[in-house]
Image (cartoon, grey):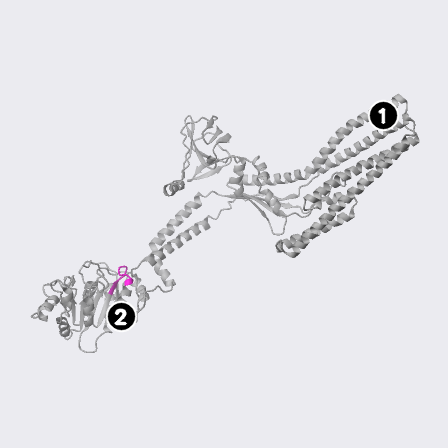
């Protein structure tokens, strides 16, 4: 018995790939070309995107410009560029740019089936925009010029219309058929605006309203603005902006960098401005008081004829003036310390207070600030490696807290010391005032007036000096950021990868087509090649008959001697000769098929003729007594045949054997169709028939009914030396091979072979095909 092989799919090989490519080549080529066309259309419709970028540097250190306590300028160490990157992405910073660059409306022209934005020489100008319904934002409207004005429409894209048809999505509707005049205020449910004509319009123009500045930032700017650190561990920031207009991209980047630097300078001057305002306010009040004091002094000296006090009075006046100035300075220090305490409690980084503390002559606190900075630097290193629960991180943060508490304690102690000094100075002032009482009343009054005048005069001079210094600081303030490269673009689109995009889309189309071909191939349950058969069964294949179109009931091997079709039968004849019996009896070859319409009668007729050409005495028997067709190939009468012999005991072989036009070939037809063909085949005369015929011929070829449809063939198979089962490519089903294995195993059939018909493989591309309906 033949070794059976279960129906299975073997490992996918390169040969399978090439087979699939060959089989589905036209569908693969079509889908690939279609994807290329889609890719080309996509590339063409995509707007060209340009990019402009600038590079700024974050300054690591800014030194103190003033040495006075009242200026209170700060020192900064290296900054984290993440903060700057975040700031540059905020609406507040970009709002200043949008005030200068107009994104309120964008205008488009039609060029080569796509909309191209125009930035210069725009024929219309839209003003006085007020959005009433935000649904209009981002919708491209079309202005069509008319004889007496223009109309405005909105056309839904084909994609939106397809989505509406398939998914029932809502379409945006803008129904306004009015004809408007230029300069007229246009009002509808979505907006109010005015359209002014700047040039003559000859064709439609499109415009898009972007809404308020916040809407513009969120929907336009945000997705096109790219802020990155240029290199790791550097303080360089790259500010890039993408736009369809290269000039606008460059302008946006330049304006953003300038606005950002200006914003930084304004922030740095904010404290100085507060100080300057305070000084100017004090100067204004002090100036009034100084003028009053000066007038009082002049009037008193004139009325009392006293020009200057005595030596002792001048001494008292000098000492009291010095004490008043010291008390005023201490009060300034006290205010500064109060501010410093609040700063320490509310801020993490204490770099800014170092200059102020240095003027308080508190070296201990300065050392603590340096120590705190070291701890904070160490904390940053640990934070990058460990979680908040790590013992080292917990310990360093506890130390930071202790140092900060100590700094606050020291500042409070300084404040206590200053209060103590002021109390001492007040006591000394009181002592001098007591001694001043010993002077004559007129001189004493003059000393007080003149002392008041001199104190106010010195304070006025001091504040004037501070005002000048703070103005100098204001004008000499530099930004923490420096422009390294101003905005630059190459005027070449950054999305200039059309060839790559087209290649990728084409490749995707090819891959999709190939996967689809694999799926189709997997879902195809029909036998398509000899390789399919070899994968599914171990039964021997004796030949492969190529596909060939021909007229019905025509013996092709006789008419086309050198055709691939005829050569395939010669090959089959050679293969079958190896089955030749060793005795003098005929070799009997049975030909059947899986189902009807596989061309078994045609194969049997042509095979018999090819044996005749080799001068073998051959007999062709038609045992397909249900639907006989074999007699048509030889144009013989079918009134007598196998059915006649099996039903009529008086019928002899000579009555049913017919000669043909071929010298060595005889034929026995099926005879008249009977009502019970299955029972007829079981007749004992069938064995007698074969016993007699095997002694008369060298080869007997039997044409039978399909084995997969009726049981007749299984009965006849025991009389044959070789049973050839015909499989027509792209017609016979793979599952039949499993059924065939079961039949062979059940009936213990031997000498089973396969024959492929209508093969489309390369060496049989002239091929053969034949079909009929079996009933």
- Label 1 neighbourhood size at 10 Å, few (<14), some (14-19), many (20+)? many
**Which residue is situated farthest in the bottom direction here?**
583
Residue 631 tag number: none
Q: Earlier in the sequence, mark 2 or mark 1?
A: 1
- Residue 559 lies left or right of residue 649; in this view the side is right
- Closer to the camera in the image, 419 or 559: 419
Tag 2 secondary structure: helix
Residue 368: x and y in percent read 74, 49
- Closer to the camera in the image, 113 or 61: 61
Tag 1 secondary structure: helix
Q: Is residue 731 magenta?
A: yes
Residue 500: x and y in percent read 46, 51
Q: Main secondary structure of the magenta part?
A: loop
- Label 2 neighbourhood size at 10 Å, few (<14), some (14-19), many (20+)? some
Residue highlighted by disc 2: 745
Q: Is residue 209 magenta?
A: no
Q: Is residue 627 above or below residue 213?
A: below
**Which residue is situated farthest in the top direction here?**
303
- Residue shown at 62%/40% (left/top)? 260
Q: Is residue 751 visible?
A: yes
Q: Is residue 247 visible?
A: no
Boundaries of the magenta span:
726-735
Residue 297 tag number: 1
Q: Quadrant of the N terminus?
A: bottom left
Residue 79: x and y in percent read 65, 47
């Amino acid at each position: 018995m033949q070794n059976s092989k279960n129906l299975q799919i073997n490992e996918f090989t390169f040969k399978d790939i090439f087979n699939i490519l060959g089989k589905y080549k036209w569908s693969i080529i079509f889908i690939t070309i279609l994807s290329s066309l889609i890719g080309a259309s996509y590339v063409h419709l995509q707007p060209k995107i340009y990019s402009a970028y600038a590079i700024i540097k974050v300054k690591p250190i800014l030194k103190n410009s003033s040495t006075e306590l009242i200026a209170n300028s700060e020192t900064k160490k290296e900054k984290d560029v993440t903060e700057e990157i975040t700031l540059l992405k905020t609406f507040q910073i970009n709002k200043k740019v949008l005030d200068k660059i107009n994104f309120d409306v964008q205008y488009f022209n039609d060029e080569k089936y796509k909309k191209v934005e125009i930035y210069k020489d725009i024929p219309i100008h839209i003003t006085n925009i007020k959005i009433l319904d935000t649904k209009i934002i981002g919708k491209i409207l079309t202005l069509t010029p008319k004889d007496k004005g223009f109309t405005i429409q909105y056309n839904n894209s084909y994609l939106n219309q397809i989505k509406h048809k398939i998914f029932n999505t809502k379409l945006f509707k803008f129904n306004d058929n009015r004809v408007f005049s230029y300069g007229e205020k246009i009002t509808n449910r979505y907006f109010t605006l005015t359209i002014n004509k700047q040039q003559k319009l000859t064709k439609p123009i499109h415009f898009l309203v972007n809404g308020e500045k916040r809407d513009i930032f969120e929907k336009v700017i945000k997705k096109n603005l790219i802020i990155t650190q240029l290199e790791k561990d550097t303080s360089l920031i790259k500010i890039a902006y993408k736009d369809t207009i290269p000039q606008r991209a460059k302008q946006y980047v330049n304006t953003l960098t300038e606005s950002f630097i200006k914003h930084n300078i304004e922030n740095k001057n904010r404290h100085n401005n507060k100080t300057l305002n305070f000084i100017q306010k004090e100067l204004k009040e002090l100036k009034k008081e100084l003028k009053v004091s000066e007038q009082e002094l002049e009037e008193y000296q004139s009325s009392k004829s006293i020009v200057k006090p005595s030596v002792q009075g001048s001494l008292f006046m000098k000492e009291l003036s010095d004490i008043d100035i010291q008390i005023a300075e201490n009060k300034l220090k006290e205010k500064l310390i109060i501010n410093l305490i609040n700063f320490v409690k509310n801020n993490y980084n204490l770099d800014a207070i170092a200059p102020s503390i240095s003027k308080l002559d508190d070296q201990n606190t300065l050392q603590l600030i340096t120590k705190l900075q070291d701890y904070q630097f160490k904390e940053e290193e640990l934070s990058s490696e460990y979680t908040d629960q790590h013992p080292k991180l917990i310990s360093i943060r506890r130390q930071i807290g202790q140092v900060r508490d100590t700094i606050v304690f020291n500042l409070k102690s300084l404040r206590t010391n200053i209060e103590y000094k002021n109390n001492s100075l007040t006591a000394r002032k009181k002592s001098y005032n007591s001694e001043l009482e010993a002077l004559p009343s007129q001189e004493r009054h003059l000393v007080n007036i003149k002392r008041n005048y001199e104190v106010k005069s010195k304070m006025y001079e001091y504040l004037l000096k501070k005002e000048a210094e703070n103005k100098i600081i204001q004008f000499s303030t530099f930004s923490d950021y420096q422009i390294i490269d101003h905005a630059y673009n190459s005027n070449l689109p950054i999305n200039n990868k059309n060839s790559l995009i087209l290649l990728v889309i084409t490749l995707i189309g090819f891959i999709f087509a190939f996967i689809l071909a694999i799926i189709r191939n997997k879902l195809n349950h029909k036998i398509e090649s000899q390789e399919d058969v070899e994968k599914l069964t171990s039964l021997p294949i004796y030949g492969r008959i190529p596909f060939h179109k021909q007229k019905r009931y025509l013996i092709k091997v006789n008419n086309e001697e050198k055709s691939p079709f005829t050569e395939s039968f010669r090959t089959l004849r050679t293969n079958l000769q190896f089955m030749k019996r060793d005795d003098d009896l005929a070799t009997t070859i049975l030909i059947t098929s899986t189902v009807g319409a596989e061309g078994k009668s045609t194969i049997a007729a042509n095979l018999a003729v090819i044996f005749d050409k080799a001068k073998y005495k051959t007999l062709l028997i038609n045992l397909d007594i249900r639907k006989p067709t074999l007699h048509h190939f030889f144009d013989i009468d079918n009134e007598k045949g196998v059915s006649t012999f099996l039903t009529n005991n008086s019928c002899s072989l000579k009555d049913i054997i017919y000669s043909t036009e071929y010298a060595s070939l005889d034929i026995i037809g099926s005879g008249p169709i009977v009502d019970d063909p299955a029972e007829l085949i079981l007749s004992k005369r069938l064995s007698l028939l074969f016993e007699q015929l095997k002694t008369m011929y060298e080869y007997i070829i039997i044409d039978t009914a399909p084995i997969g449809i009726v049981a007749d063939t299984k009965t006849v198979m025991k009389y044959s030396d070789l049973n050839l089962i015909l499989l027509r490519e792209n017609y016979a089903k793979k599952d039949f091979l499993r059924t065939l294995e079961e039949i062979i195993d059940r009936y213990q059939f031997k000498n089973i072979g396969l024959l492929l018909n209508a093969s489309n493989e390369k060496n049989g591309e002239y091929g053969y095909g034949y079909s009929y309906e079996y009933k």
